[in-house]
Structures are given as C-alpha cells and as structure tokens.
Image (cartoon, grey):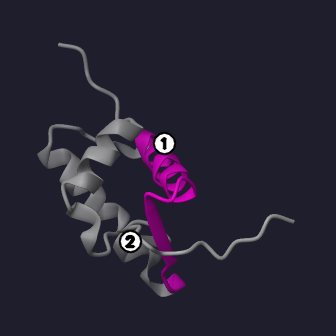
C-alpha cells in the first residue's frame, strides 16, 4: 500500500474541521495527523512546517511566535490558529 504524503489539501481539511479554532502547536498538529493515519517523521517535519507557513501566507491560518523557552516543549516556534473571517492583514507591500 502506497503511503500518502501530507499535502495542503489535508491540512485545509483539518482547518475546515475546526481543529485550528483554538491555537495548536506543532506537536498537537502532528498528533492530529497521526490519528488521521498520516505519520510525520523527523524528516517530514520541515515539509509540514512549510505547508503551515504557506497556509499562513494564503491567510487560511495565522501564527503567533512562542517564547523561546517553550520551543522544545511545543515542537516548534509557533502556535497556529484558523484565520478568522474579517481579520485584516496589516502587512504592507514595500
């Protein structure tokens, strides 16, 4: 049986299912994907982080940087939340 790779559509399905309605760290995201049958090993963590960053850029997710003291415990630097309808992006194009 061929392994399915984690892709953006899988993460969007998780977003639409309400998982990101409250903030989730990388460990919680990996655990959720594991319950769905997608195993994320050490080599795949960077790919998952790239997908999450891409979804932040597409304004489907937003992220908040954690204090450095929490990085090891949470599995990464950020907490990810679903982007709320009506939130404005304050970035400027320079």
38 sits left or right of 63 in the view: left
Whether residue 28 is in magenta: the answer is no
Q: Which of 77 and 72 lies nearest the eye of the viewer?
A: 77
30 sits left or right of 91 in the view: left
Q: Residue at x 41, y 67 (%)?
A: 83
Q: Which residues are magenta?
A: 43-68
Q: Which of 79 and 61 lies nearest the eye of the viewer?
A: 61
Magenta region, main secondary structure: helix
Mark 2 secondary-structure assignment: loop
84 sits left or right of 78 in the view: left
Question: For residue 71, which numbered disc appears in the image?
Answer: none
Alpha carbon of mark 2 to alpha carbon of mark 1: how far? 24 Å
Q: Position of residue 52 (x, y in %)?
A: 46, 53
Mark 1 secondary-structure assignment: helix
Q: Position of residue 34 (x, y in %)?
A: 18, 46
Q: Which residue is mark 2?
A: 84
* Quadrant of res 79: bottom left
Q: Is residue 80 above or below residue 65?
A: above
Crowding at mark 1 (Cα within 10 Å: few <14, some 14-19, many 20+): some
Precedes in sequence: disc 2 or disc 1: 1
Question: For residue 47, which numbered disc appears in the image?
Answer: 1
């Amino acid at each position: 049986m061929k392994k399915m790779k984690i892709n953006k559509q899988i993460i969007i399905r998780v977003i639409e299912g309400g998982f990101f309605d409250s903030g989730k760290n990388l460990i919680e995201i990996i655990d959720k994907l594991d319950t769905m049958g997608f195993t994320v090993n050490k080599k795949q963590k960077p790919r998952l982080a790239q997908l999450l960053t891409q979804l932040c850029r597409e304004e489907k997710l937003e992220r908040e940087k954690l204090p450095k003291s929490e990085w090891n415990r949470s599995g990464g630097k950020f907490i990810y939340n679903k982007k709320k309808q009506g939130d404005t992006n304050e970035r400027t194009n320079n």
